[in-house]
Image: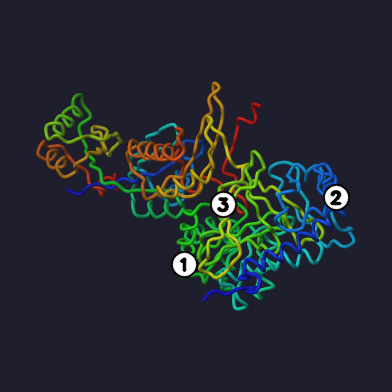
Amino acid sequence: MERYWNEEIECMPREEMKKLQDERLVAQVKHVYENVPYYRSLMDEKGVKPEDIKSTDDLHKLPFLTKADLRDAYPYGLLAKPLSDCVRIQSTSGTTGKRVVAFYTQHDIDLWEDCCARAITAAGGTNEDVCQVCYGYGLFTGGPGLNGGSHKVGCLTLPMSSGNTERQITFMRDLGATILCCTPSYAAYIGETLHDMGYTTDDIKLKAGIFGAEPWTEEMRRSIEKSLGIKAYDIYGLTETSGPGVSFECSEQTGMHINEDHFIPEIINPETGEVLPDGEVGELVFTSITKEAFPLLRYRTRDLCVLSRKKCSCGRTLIKMTKPMGRSDDMMIIRGVNVFPSQIETVLIEQGYSPNYLIEVDRVNNTDTLDISVEMNPDQLSDKVKDMQDQEKSLAIAIKTMLGINPKVHLVAPKSITRSEGKAVRVIDKRKLHD
Amino acid sequence: MANVRQISVFVDNKPNQLAGVMKLLKESGINIRALSLADTKDFGILRIIVNDTDKAVETLKNALYAVTVTEILAISIPDSAGQLSRVLDILGSENVNLEYLYAFTGASDKAVSFVIRVDDNANASAALTKGGIIQLTENDIAEM
């Protein structure tokens, strides 16, 4: 029996939803034009006036915002409300350059937490649940977002933040946590630690996990589900649009429903900016139509995915997005071939290896090199060196089949690759050091 | 003929990795009777025969090392020219394939001991017995 946090919105007929979006978009464009000089000048450059935007059909006329705009406008340039109306600041992890800060009014916090409440409810959460949040708390949106959503649903909330994994497991056991919220790489680590501590899934009460903030594969999902004895749900979001909860997965586990009453999605060709029809792969673009303090219009996420309006068995009518194939930032071009870490992860898990790996890309004599360190599978240890070298070779062949380029595979000892308690660092691109 | 159990441990080819294993065994009071380290660019496989195999395996597994146990043959031959050649001839005449071997010191300075890893323990053991080669049991080695 599917449960909804806001059935009226989540199952709203398409026509009604479009009407709601139209009204909200028109008002939002006016609000931004009047209050954000930075975006007003972008619109003026393009010759677009607020009156030109009469419905979502006119969305394509608006200029895009990119991460570069956010950096240029740092810190207050895209603020649409006086600071006296704002109650919170959150920030990106800053891994790809200068930090981006986002501002929230109380209304913005409420709608964000409401989105997270929808995600928790879709994962089966009710006020009977104990929700353990081990996303980082602080400037990172993961902890505060899910914490707020958990409160709304009425779960008993365990605000653990990340780290101290053995303590996480002690709390999980002692207080009977039923829902786990963290990054997928940390969930995998918690599962591994649980078993290393000598426990099994019988020793914990978890039933569901809500995992996001980094790309992860279907294979990784199955492996986490098995090791923690749960159903694992994906959640998506970014600081620029609010945080986690922009979209969330339902029991069908075939993509994430976008909270369209707050965020209008588009898929564009990343090269030309042209809007693509549903079903085509392209860059995801979001327009916030309800946020007050930091309302980004047509923000380019750099995430590549596909939108689908196919009817979902859960009953929700909200449009679905596929799991992002990776941020365009994560994509590496190695010997002219596009490579995503998620492709390599898929092969590793299929071949029975742990999802802990390190990719090192370098350039030697003008040729790109790809080295992948993988933790050997303890069940496959042989006393014969040749057997172990054969394992390296067959893994290299499987990866070559997937990517089309030859990697060098290095087996390393179990547990020797540093575990992540937040977003995992899986790629070291040394070519950048030479540039 | 009882085969002898050999423990193999996967170790990264980096400083201090072997030292870590040795420290662990020392702390558990385990004595190594025979040892060989096969190494590649990326990793090494440490092979050991100890005085208490079960305890050593448990200790290593608890410390999250990758460990496997293989049955090997151990022999003791006189420390004189041509003795090993004789052993290899016996194995060769039975078509036994030798994967690897390594020497270790036994109880007497008149004899030398070898670990022999073959693809067919039963056949090799029978051939060695027939050829008059002394085979050691796990107990013999533990009590050396």
Q: x%, y% of residue A372?
A: 49, 38
Q: Which SS class for mark 1? A: helix
Query: Where is B92 relative to A53, above or below?
Result: above
Which numbered disc flags the more N-terminal residue, 2 or 3?
2
Taking depth in this image into account, of A94 and A383 the one nearest to the observer is A94
Residue sitting at 82 percent across and 58 percent down?
A: A293
**3D distance between C-alphas at marks 2 and 3:** 33 Å
Which residue corresponds to mark 2?
A76
Residue sitting at 37 percent across and 40 percent down?
A: A391
Which residue corresponds to mark 1?
A201
Q: Are marks 2 and 3 in contact (CB under 8 Å)?
A: no
Which numbered disc flags the more N-terminal residue, 2 or 1?
2
Q: Amino acid at mark 3?
A: Val
Taking depth in this image into account, of A430 and B104 the one nearest to the observer is A430
Q: Which SS class for mark 3? A: loop
In the figure, is residue A272 to the left or right of A344?
A: right
Residue sitting at 12 percent across and 42 percent down?
A: B126
Image quadrant containing the C terminus of chain A: top right
In the figure, is residue A408 to the left or right of A167?
A: left
**3D distance between C-alphas at marks 2 and 1:** 48 Å
Which residue corresponds to mark 3?
A306
Question: Callout 1: residue from which chain?
Answer: A
**3D distance between C-alphas at marks 1 and 3:** 35 Å
Q: Amino acid at mark 1?
A: Thr
Q: How is the image coloured?
A: rainbow
Query: Where is A139 relative to A411, above or below?
Result: below
In the figure, is residue A163 to the left or right of B135?
A: right
Q: Residue furthest top?
A: A365
Q: Are marks 2 and 1 in contact (CB under 8 Å)?
A: no
Q: Quadrant of residue A180?
A: bottom right
Q: Are marks 1 and 3 in contact (CB under 8 Å)?
A: no
